[in-house]
Amino acid sequence: MAVALTRQMLYRNSAQPHPIEAHRVDSLAMFYTSIADGKEGVAAFLEKRDAQFAGKASQMPPFYPWWKG
């Protein structure tokens, strides 16, 4: 999911009329990815195990799509 979301942010945010719009989307992405996969990543690191990420590109966060152009 991280790669799909990053690609969409690169493509779509570059067309935003003002940089604050890109910042808002970036902040939302950081929030939503920290909820599940972010916690799993930190827990796996601390427990010295492989992470079991559950996020999928087919299940993008609820704020996506944020821009319709």
Image (tube, helix red, strand yellow):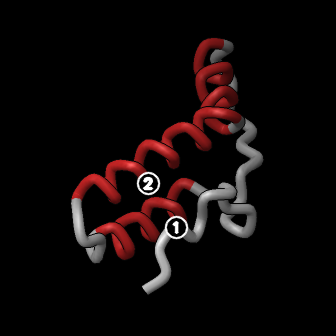
Against 21, residue 28 (above or below) is: above
Residue position for label 2: 25
Asked whether the residues under the numbered discs 1 and 2 touch, taking CB atoms below 8 Å apart as contact, a structural biologist would say yes
Q: Farthest residue in the left direction?
A: 18
- Badge 1 amino acid: Trp
Q: Is residue 52 left or right of residue 18?
A: right
Mark nearer the N terminus (1 vs 2) = 2
Residue position for label 1: 66
Residue 45: which disc? none
- Under tag 1, what secondary structure? loop
Instruction: Report the front residue among 18 and 7.
Output: 18
> x, y percentage for residue 17?
24, 71
Q: For residue 40, what is the image quadrant?
A: top right
Instruction: Report the front residue among 7 and 45.
Output: 7
Q: Is residue 35 left or right of residue 26?
A: right
Residue at (68% x, 57% y) in the render: 62
Which quadrant does the N terminus fall into?
bottom right
Q: Is residue 16 left or right of residue 54?
A: left
Which quadrant does the C terminus fall into?
bottom left
Q: Is residue 67 left or right of residue 55?
A: left
